[in-house]
């Protein structure tokens, strides 16, 4: 009798037009602990969410629906029909741990007329699958296969990703067809899904995607081939080591390692060391073949960062690298590490390019410091003209980024702070050497 009365009160409050009373009704609903009342409470809250109210009421309703567990989960996707990010987020958070019980309600919304609702539903299903829950998810396969043909690319992309997590081979043919989708996100997720499913028949269709125009498709395809471990992928993956995007090269290296691949020449060894962030390997290569590192540094066809090579050449200290480092310093005028590499070589020929680098405001002060340290070691070896050039150094200025709270006017008229650089210690060393002569 008391339970029936409590439900009548809650029902009356939830139907009120006064949001304050509705919020009180939600609180009262949470106080009803009787398990057999959970379905009726969840239905009342579901009706409230479908109708929609103030943002506060909607959020409170979603949070309340999480409490009954599986009983409330069936109504949570109703939140996706509201154009409210926070509401969607709360509902997704409540559903992600619902396991197999979330499949039915979410799949119903995969047929919604609103593409954003369909997207939120399939995105949430992916989040549920990310938790690797136990249970039977086979009921999700037919709706997800239908979603793979959705008119909205984001829905197709999420559907492809979800199908790869179900461990069922039935989606393999449709996923192979999705490798030709006009949307790069769909192609990339279809490739990953086929890799997760270890679909050996997908190797040949996957190989062309290693040359896809989209870098994420290329990296996802390389990761997919990591699971398939097919020797036919070796040569195309090795070619990917020249990709301009680091994450693509890293994916290729990961896949190649599963194929026990070994570099065929010194350029591949250098690329492998760069991609693997193996600085010691770069130095080791340069110690036996410094010309190979220099050639790689100068190669304009290599479109990714070669800064570690410049740093390695500095640590190796071979004067043969001075011309290449000088050219790089002129091109990368804001990269102080190149100036540091030149300074480590301790050869008189590095003085002129370093003096020129003091004119680049972003690295002026550290370059003056490099020159000062250098003169302590090699001042006696410098030509008189170089020493006089040091003495003539004037107007050296260091740029300092503006603070984060700088006004727009400061950015417009300054762009940065400018501070004069003290060159007195450097000049004293040059003057002492000139006096000695």
Image (cartoon, rainbow, N blue to C red):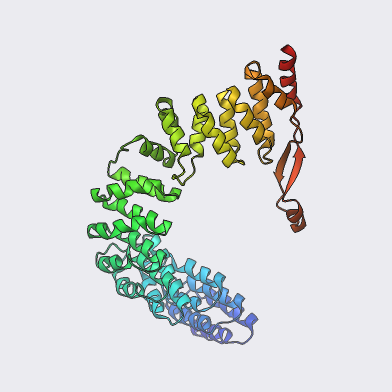
Tell me the residue at 33%/36% (across/down): 265
Q: Which x, y percent locates residue 392?
A: 75, 28
Tell me the residue at 36%/39% (across/down): 268
Q: Is residue 156 left or right of residue 232?
A: right
Tell me the residue at 66%/31% (across/down): 355
Residue 246 vs residue 267, the one in the foreground: 267
Q: Which x, y percent locates residue 245?
A: 45, 50
Q: Is residue 163 left or right of residue 292?
A: left
Q: Which x, y percent locates residue 244?
A: 44, 49
Q: Is residue 173 visible from the viewing direction of this image?
A: yes
Tell me the residue at 22%/59% (across/down): 201
The correct choice, above or below, for 428 with respect to 127 in the image is above
Which quarter of the figure is the C terminus placed in?
A: top right
Q: Is residue 196 visible from the viewing direction of this image?
A: no
Image quarter of residue 23: bottom right
Q: Which x, y percent locates residue 114?
A: 46, 80
The correct choice, above or below, for 85 with respect to 378 in the image is below
Furthest residue in direction left, as rendered: 201
Q: Is residue 19 left or right of residue 395?
A: left
Image quarter of residue 97: bottom left
Residue 259 vs residue 410, the one in the foreground: 410
Q: Is residue 28 left or right of residue 210?
A: right
The correct choice, above or below, for 10 with respect to 410 in the image is below
Residue 394 vs residue 167, the one in the foreground: 394
Furthest residue in direction top, as rendered: 436
């Amino acid at each position: 009798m008391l339970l029936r009365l409590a439900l009548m009160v809650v029902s009356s409050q939830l139907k009120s037009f006064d949001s304050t009373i509705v919020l009180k009704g939600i609180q009262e609903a949470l106080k009803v602990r009787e398990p057999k009342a959970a379905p009726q409470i969840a239905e009342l809250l579901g009706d409230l969410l479908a109708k929609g109210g103030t943002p506060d009421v909607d959020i409170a309703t979603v949070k309340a629906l999480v409490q009954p567990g599986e009983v409330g989960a069936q109504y949570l996707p109703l939140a996706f029909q509201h154009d409210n990010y926070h509401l969607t987020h709360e509902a997704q958070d409540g559903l992600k741990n619902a396991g197999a019980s979330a499949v039915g309600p979410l799949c119903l919304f995969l047929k919604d007329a609103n593409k954003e609702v369909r997207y939120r539903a399939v995105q949430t299903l992916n989040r549920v699958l990310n938790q690797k829950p136990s249970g039977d998810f086979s009921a999700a396969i037919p709706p997800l296969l239908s979603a793979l043909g959705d008119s909205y690319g984001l829905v197709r992309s999420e559907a492809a990703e979800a199908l790869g997590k179900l461990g069922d081979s039935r989606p393999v043919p449709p996923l192979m067809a999705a490798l030709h989708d006009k949307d790069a996100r769909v192609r990339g997720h279809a490739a990953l899904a086929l890799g997760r499913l270890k679909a050996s028949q997908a190797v040949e269709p996957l190989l062309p995607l290693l040359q896809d125009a989209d870098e994420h498709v290329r990296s996802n395809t390389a990761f997919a081939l990591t699971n398939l471990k097919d020797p036919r992928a070796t040569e195309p993956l090795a070619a990917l080591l020249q990709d301009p995007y680091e994450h693509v090269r890293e994916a290729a290296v990961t896949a190649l390692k599963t194929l026990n691949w070994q570099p065929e020449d010194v350029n591949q060894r250098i690329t492998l060391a760069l991609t693997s962030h193996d600085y010691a390997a770069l130095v080791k290569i340069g110690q036996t073949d410094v010309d190979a590192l220099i050639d790689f540094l100068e190669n304009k066809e290599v479109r990714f960062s070669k800064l570690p090579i410049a740093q390695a050449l500095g640590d190796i200290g071979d004067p043969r690298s001075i011309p290449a480092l000088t050219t790089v310093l002129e091109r990368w005028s804001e990269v102080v590490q190149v100036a540091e590499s030149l300074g480590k070589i301790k050869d008189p020929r590095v003085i002129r390019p370093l003096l020129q680098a003091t004119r680049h405001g972003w690295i002026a002060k550290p370059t003056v410091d490099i020159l000062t340290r250098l003169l302590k070691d090699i001042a006696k070896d410098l030509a008189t003209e170089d020493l006089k050039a040091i003495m003539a150094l004037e107007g050296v200025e260091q740029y300092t980024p503006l603070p984060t709270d700088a006004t727009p006017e400061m950015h417009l008229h300054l762009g940065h702070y400018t501070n004069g650089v003290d060159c007195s210690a450097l000049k004293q060393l040059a003057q002492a050497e000139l006096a000695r002569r």
